[in-house]
């Protein structure tokens, strides 16, 4: 059974990533994102475009400027980012540090997760002193 490739419109990319359509077009113009397949209003995007935009957003969330991000994207490939939507439980470890655990894993391995959180907090508390 052949796996169907997911296609997105620019509007769908915008809704999924939070970037405006104008910003997505700008990223294409600047070479941060590949041009869509097809032309004009019939252009469409793939998961690779969505992953790249998620990667750019993650780098921006770390406080990096677009010029630095552009340089990074030239030298490093975008990491594989899961496109599947799931429910995650968020744990704050320390200021600026969060751990997101898939809800099913949280239910299955709750004690282990609590131990990981305890150890991470302990390590980060030592480094602040």
Image: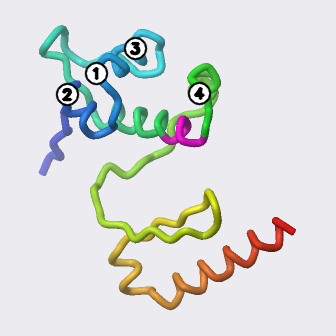
Residue 74 falls left or right of residue 41:
right
Res 69 label? 4
The answer to which of marks 1 and 2 sits earlier in the sequence is 2
Q: Residue under circle 3?
A: 26
Residue 28 falls left or right of residue 64:
left
Residue 83 lies, in percent from the top left, at 32, 49
Would you say residue 111 sits in the magenta stretch?
Answer: no
Rendering quarter of residue 71: top right
Query: Circles 1 and 2: CB distance less than 8 Å?
Result: yes
The residue drawn where x is 42% and y is 33% is 52
The answer to which of marks 3 and 4 sits earlier in the sequence is 3
Q: What separation in Å lies between label 1 and label 2 (alpha carbons)?
A: 7 Å
* Above/below status of 128 relative to 73: below
Q: Residue under circle 1?
A: 21
The answer to which of marks 4 and 1 sits earlier in the sequence is 1
Residue 5 lies, in percent from the top left, at 20, 38
Task: Check disc 2: other Cα within 10 Å, few if <14, some if 14-19, many if 20+.
Answer: few
Q: What separation in Å lies between label 3 and label 1 (alpha carbons)?
A: 9 Å
Q: Which residues are magenta?
A: 58-62
């Amino acid at each position: 059974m052949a796996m169907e490739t997911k296609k997105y419109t620019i509007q769908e990319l915008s809704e999924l990533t939070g970037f405006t359509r104008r910003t997505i077009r700008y990223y294409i113009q600047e070479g941060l994102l590949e041009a869509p397949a097809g032309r004009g209003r019939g252009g469409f995007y793939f998961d690779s475009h969505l992953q790249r935009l998620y990667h750019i957003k993650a780098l921006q969330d770390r406080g990096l400027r677009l010029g630095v991000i552009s340089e990074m994207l030239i030298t490093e490939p975008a990491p594989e980012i899961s496109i599947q939507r799931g429910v995650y439980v968020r744990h704050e470890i320390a200021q600026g540090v969060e751990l997101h655990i898939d809800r099913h894993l949280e239910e299955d391995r709750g004690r282990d997760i609590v131990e990981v959180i305890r150890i991470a907090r302990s390590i980060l508390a030592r480094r602040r002193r």
